Amino acid sequence: DGFAGIDHLFRETWAGRAETVARTELAQAQVMSALDRYAATGLVDQVEIVESTDTDAPCVARAGQVVPLSTKPGLLHPNCRVSLVPIIREAE
């Protein structure tokens, strides 16, 4: 049937799977900790979504958007490279 076996899956299909999982989990932790830090300051209500320059269409579409901190923006897919820039509220 053309099935190359389980070994082929690990050598070819899933060759970079561990790196993808590690990179994605680290990115998710960084985004969540940034959101927590921004909220803890009491000075941030919104963040700007910044995407890497070599991203896909869904990521490019949200680049530059300013969203409420409460929406908790995160990754769209594995290997997503999003950054959140805090928008500091003016002193009252």
Image (tube, rainbow, N blue to C red):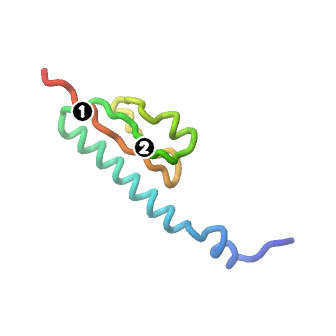
Q: Residue at x 27, y 30 (%)?
A: 45
- Residue under the point 50% across and 44% down: 76
Task: State the separation of the CA atoms marked 2 and 1.
Answer: 17 Å
Whole-percent x, y for residue 77 in the image: 53, 49
The extreme right residue here reads: 1
6 over 20 or under it: above or below: below
Look at the picture and state if 7 lies above or below 18: below
Residue that lies at the very extreme toward the bottom in this rendered image: 7
Task: Name the spot of residue 50 as percent of width and height, x first.
Answer: 40, 40
Q: Nearer the viewer, residue 19 or 64?
A: 64
Residue that mark 1 sits on: 44
Q: In this view, does 15 lie to the left or right of 54?
A: right
CB of mark 2 within 8 Å of CB of mark 1?
A: no
Q: What residue type is labelled 1?
A: Val
Q: Mark 2 points at which residue?
A: 74
For the N terminus, the image quarter is bottom right
Q: Is mark 2 on a helix, strand or loop?
A: loop
Three-letter amino acid code at the position of disc 2? Gly
Q: Quadrant of residue 86?
A: top left
Residue farthest along the front direction in this orientation: 53
The residue at 38%/29% (across/down) is 66
